Image (cartoon, helix red, strand yellow):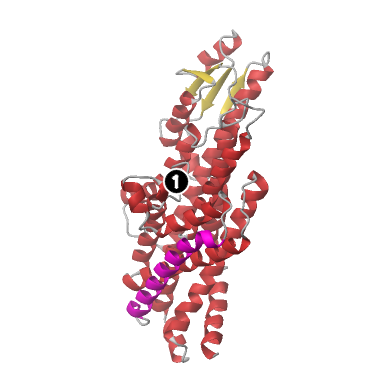
Amino acid sequence: MNAIYYTLAVTWKEIQVISRERAWLVILFLLPLLIGGFMGAGNLAANRPDANVILLKVGLVNQDSNTFGMEMARTLHTIEQLQVSDFSNVSEAEQQVAKGDLNAVIIIPADFSQKINQYTPTKVEVIVDPAEPEAANIVTGIMKQMAAEFAIWGEVQYGVRTIFEEAGILSAASPQEVRAIEAQNLGAVMTRINEMRTNPVIAVSVENPTGVDRGQAIQTFFAYLFPGMTVMFIYFIIAMSSTALLNERETGTLRRLLTATIPRGAILAGKMLAYMLLACLQVVVMFTVARLVFGTPLGRSPLGLVVLTLVVAFNATALGMMVAALVKTEKQAANIGLLMAFVLAGLGGAMAMTPTPLSRTAGLMGTIAKFIPHSYAVEGYYRIMAENGGFIQVLPQVGILLGMGVIFFVIALWRFKFEA
């Protein structure tokens, strides 16, 4: 009974600490909602029966030669519904609109990339032909969708940079190293967003509209997309929990807990329980939004969802404790934790790069996925939500994740030094 009391006491203390970590809470809750929402909306828009609109002639004046300006210009040239012509100055393009040769002109300001990097408001100007309101609505609609995407880019960049600054990870790095590290951590997510925009994974056939449910294929894909996105951000807890544990060791908090005769196992278990609750809350928030906004199926096995979520949360938090036990400093834990969050998500298929979980594909990537905990988490959710599997169908995934988690916890308990 004393061990349970001590574990719960440590859990409550850790929950209070977590509630003050606003930057991490943005990463764990807001970013997956933003990215998942954008990718979901992009797939729905790309698979509308009326997705093929009339070709419009659009002029583009890109005054920004930096990253985001070039990316927006490149994206506009890939949109099939637009015939984009580049102009060097605004007045020349406006004359083409006035003569009726162009439906609209899009102007990317010179400070567009700078404003996004600084996380400050910016705007892209669209000049339209008032004589063609339908064309104007189409162009402005496309630009609003693109603006939402670039807003996500800014949110992601701001969130990652905030965590780096608060953790002091980049304090000793040069400006060149700072840019390289930020690009490395943002690259995986940004690349995936770009792919989803230009080449959605699911293409819904409408050849037989009277006999085929158009929404079935896309909803099945959502049962992979949103759990995958959720699993990816659950494992961000690796960096958060490991740095928190090492910080307490450095400040002497763990030493005071040991002098209070609290068992070492109860200390680690209490911390893990707090982060498990955080992971479970991530799942509840993400799946609720996915269900209410996108109609994502949740399957017919609440028991399977609950047990699988608890095991995934245990696995992620135990992995965080193991990382804390194997590294020496908070900086190392943060770097390794963030890197693992992206790399393991990609290798484990949490980024929804294929129509079905990556572990089901043949070849090298499918084989590698079988060694990554993310793949078993995604596979379990897919069986329940997309295939209406029950608790029995996810027992293999539950067992493997639980076994991995136990190994991670044992290593953490064995190797972690409670005193600096």
Using the image, determine if residue 284 lies above or below residue 214: below
* Front-lying residue, 387 or 75: 387
Please state the horizontal and vertical placement of residue 44, each as a whole percent of the image: 59, 36
Q: Confirm whether the magenta stretch covers residue 278.
A: no
Q: Confirm whether the magenta stretch covers residue 413.
A: yes
Magenta range is 391-417
- Quadrant of the drawing holding the N terminus: bottom right
- Quadrant of the drawing holding the C terminus: bottom left
Q: Amino acid at mark 1?
A: Val
* Front-lying residue, 283 or 144: 283
* Front-lying residue, 223 or 120: 223
The answer to whether residue 186 is visible is: no
Q: Which residue is mark 1?
A: 189
Residue at image location 38% in from the left, 81% down from the top? 418
Using the image, determine if residue 410 lies above or below residue 400: below
Using the image, determine if residue 395 lies above or below residue 43: below
Please state the horizontal and vertical placement of residue 337, each as a whole percent of the image: 39, 61
Our reading of the magenta stretch's main secondary structure is helix
Residue at image location 32% in from the left, 71% down from the top? 326
Residue at image location 49% in from the left, 41% down from the top? 116
Give the quarter of the image for residue 373.
bottom left
Please state the horizontal and vertical placement of residue 173, each as a whole percent of the image: 32, 56
